[in-house]
Image (cartoon, rainbow, N blue to C red):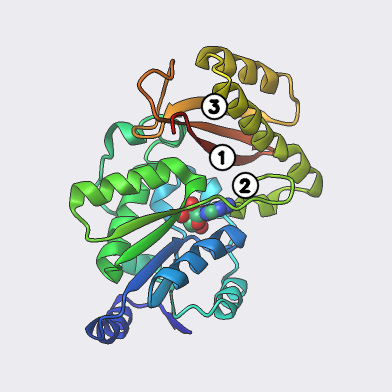
Amino acid sequence: MQIISSIKDLNNHLKSLKTQKKSIGLVPTMGALHDGHISLVRHSKEKCDVSVVSIFVNPVQFNSSKDLKKYPRDLENDLRILEKEGIDVVFTPKEDEIYPSKPTLSLSMGEVAQQLEGHFRPGHFEGVALIVAKLFNIVQPDVAFFGQKDLQQLQVIRKLVRELSFPVDIVGVPTVREKGGLAMSSRNQRLSEEGHIKASVLYESLNKASKMILEGKEVVSIVKQYTSDFDQNPDVELEYFHIVNPENMLPVETYEGLNDVAICIAAYVEGIRLIDNLYLRLKI
Ligand code: AMP
């Protein structure tokens, strides 16, 4: 496994592989790897000749410096995991090479980035779009892998690829969950054992809501019910619970004209912000 931190060294390494017509898969991460990341890695290994995993905690996508500081980091353990997975290249760029000066370019992603995470974390998706665009330019992958756990991020990246004509296939990988249903996240490390159990109510609510949707219950009454349920739950501080059109990630009021919906939730448990979603096909 090659561990490369400079862009020039990475370019040199990938150049020879590209002339051999090897397909390159990219898995962008912020490290503190867990089984969700591993699933992306395995999808890449299965689909591509060479897999590059990037580890970079991207400061410009954090809208709180406290959150950035607290973000878990464990490069040594990450490298051990990736070595075991048989990864070809780990790209660990330094911040001053990615951002030699404070970026002035801002990629405004439009309506898909406006609600949910975009609303509660202003500037987040502009920061995500910038780092992903940079990684696509640096690595020039054939395929890039992203988790459906961050559904809005996945939709933002699909839009970025379309609008900037990046010659990259985007693969969305299903969410990996803990035994109790909680979606895996690097942030879960900061939950107590009890916090993991308390947080499983998020996935439970998504499942129950999806059943109600399939039974035809109105959007407004489902959203109202869960908002008030969480209001009465002292363990969870709900930020949002929305049923959205996955095409544009905008909350919907009816199912009319939709083939799919996604139920999206964000909430704090033990002061840790967690997000999750469930994608639902309405018509076969
Ligand atoms: P992060 O390191 O949190 O930026 O995540 C890197 C990639 O892993 C993103 O594409 C995430 O959507 C994906 N990811 C994170 N958690 C999960 C999960 N539980 N299941 C599947 N993919 C995930």
Quarter of the figure with residue 214: top right
Query: How dense is the environment of label 2, judged by Cα within 10 Å: few (below 14), some, or many (20 and up)?
Result: many
User: What amino acid type is highlighted by mark number 1?
Assistant: Ile
Q: Nearer the viewer, mark 2 or mark 3?
A: 2
Whether the residues at callouts 2 and 1 have beta carbons within 8 Å, the answer is yes
Residue drawn at 43 percent across, 55 percent down: 146
Which residue occupies the foreground of this view, 190 or 243?
243
> Mark 3 is on which residue type?
Tyr
102 sits left or right of 251 in the view: left
Residue at image mark 1: 275
**Residue 176 position within the rendered picture, expressed as x and y whole percent measured from the top left:** 60, 53
Disc nearest the viewer among 2 and 1: 2
**Residue with the mark numbered 2:** 183
Q: Residue at 25% x, 45% y: name it.
A: 107
Q: CA distance from mark 2 to mark 1?
A: 8 Å
Q: Which numbered disc covers residue 232? A: none
The local crowd at label 1, few if under 14, some if 14 to 19, many if 20 or more residues have their Cα within 10 Å, is many
What's the distance in space between the residues labelled 2 and 3, CA to CA? 17 Å
Residue at left offset 43%, top offset 16%? 254
First in sequence: mark 1 vs mark 3: 3
Label 1 sits on a secondary structure element that is: strand
Q: Quick one: SS at disc 3?
A: strand
Residue 220 on image: x %, y %:
52, 13
Q: Position of residue 243 (x, y in %)?
A: 49, 25
Tell me, yes or no, whether the two marked residues, 2 and 3, touch with CB atoms within 8 Å: no
Location of mark 3 (residue):
240
In x, y percent, where is residue 62? 45, 47
User: Is 247 above or below relative to 192?
Assistant: above
Regarding mark 2 in the picture, which secondary structure is present there?
Answer: loop
